[in-house]
Image (cartoon, helix red, strand yellow):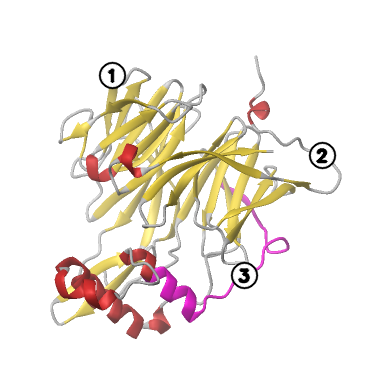
Amino acid sequence: MLSLAMFCLVNHTDSAPSQLTFHQDLIIDNESLIGVFITDVTATEQGYIAVAINDLAHIKVFSPDGSYVQTIGQRGRGPGDFLNLLSLEYKNGKFHGLDAGITAKMNLFDIQGSLNQAIAFPVLMNTTLPFARILNNGNILVKYRPLISNEVMNTEPISSFYVINTNHPNIKNRLFDSPAREQFIVRDEFGFSVVPMPFRRTNQIAELNGKIFHSWTGTEHIRVYEPDKGEIGSFSLRNILDVVELTDEDYTNYFREWFGVNPEEDIRRRVQSDATLQRQLRAYALMIEKRDELHKTFPFYNSLLSCGSYLWVSAQHKDRKKQIVLKLDENGSLIASGTLPSSVSIKHISKGYLYGLDQDEYYTPTVVRYSIH
């Protein structure tokens, strides 16, 4: 039986860290994806690529050469349907798609796309369920995040992570809590609205050797848990990574990308005829007025994943066009490092390949694959 460590390319050495290089060898453009709200990407052992497309409420599968294969799921509230498709994994021969809609559930499909099981999650009052991950023991780690309302608007939002028994979903054990400042609340005379936090902090989860690694990306610590024991330790990469300060230019570029505006385009012309853009601009104008409530630095980490026997962490490079990618052992020791374009959102690493999301020149989402050397 092959060791999982063989699924990652770069070998561990006791000498100086190795240099990682990434070569883009595949792009799946929006003519193939069609949808514009891509929430996750994963791959099978054979290299088939599965893409969670929220606005189309289905999973689209492509062959290793990027050819369309099939569509899985549809919009609806029943078993196998999606109202809010937020995450996607491939594990134990099945696709696991999280529907965080009104009736939160995990839909399990076999490789042919047939529904194998639908697991409904227990409901917690005044919360939403934006994250779920299948653990190696078959149980599910889920995150409950508080709903934004007038009652909780002025309190510190906290997300709670629970381990749910797959065979008995009503049995759940609370593992840990974490900040939930992933959204910015905009208040005006019409009430309030919620928009993504610029350069937002997120909760990242990876599982390795029976341990759960958690990063709130706004802080330097990666915390380590065992499902039956709780927190057992933590480590920091402060001695490897630099904190990168945000500038006014960073915010300007962020908002242009968010609105889908090219640097050469006069945004005022679009505002005159685009009601949606007008509402967005009002929200972000209020956000800019409250600049003191925004972040002064990029998140300490961008992503946290596992592959085989290793952890993979990415972080913003001082060169805004790059991000640093680190390969670590389970104790946080550096094995190898390299750089990727900062525009790539890393979603999955397996068998010597990195899969992620990027954008074309029109800010339209694309799926990309890089070989790792």
Q: In which quadrant of the rendered view does residue 284 lie?
A: bottom left
Q: Which residue is mark 2?
A: 13
CA distance for labels 1 and 3: 46 Å
Q: Which residue lies most toward the front here? A: 264
Q: Which residue is mark 1?
A: 114
Q: Which residue is mark 3?
A: 243
- Which residue is depicted at the point 23% across and 40% down? 56
Q: Which residues are magenta?
A: 230-255
Label 1, residues with CA under 10 Å away: few <14, some 14-19, many ≥20: some
> Which amino acid type corresponds to the residue marked 2 in the rendered image?
Thr
Among numbered discs 1 and 3, the one appearing first in the sequence: 1
Label 3, residues with CA under 10 Å away: few <14, some 14-19, many ≥20: some
- Which residue is depicted at the point 25% across and 59% down? 147
What percent of the width, then of the height, locates residue 272?
Answer: 16, 75
CA distance for labels 2 and 3: 27 Å
Specify whether residue 75 is in view.
yes
Indicate the secondary structure of the residue bearing disc 3: loop
Q: Name above or below for residue 44 compared with residue 29.
A: above
Marks 1 & 3, CB-CB < 8 Å contact: no
Nearer-the-camera pick, 16 or 322:
322
Nearer-the-camera pick, 249 or 311:
249
Label 2, residues with CA under 10 Å away: few <14, some 14-19, many ≥20: few
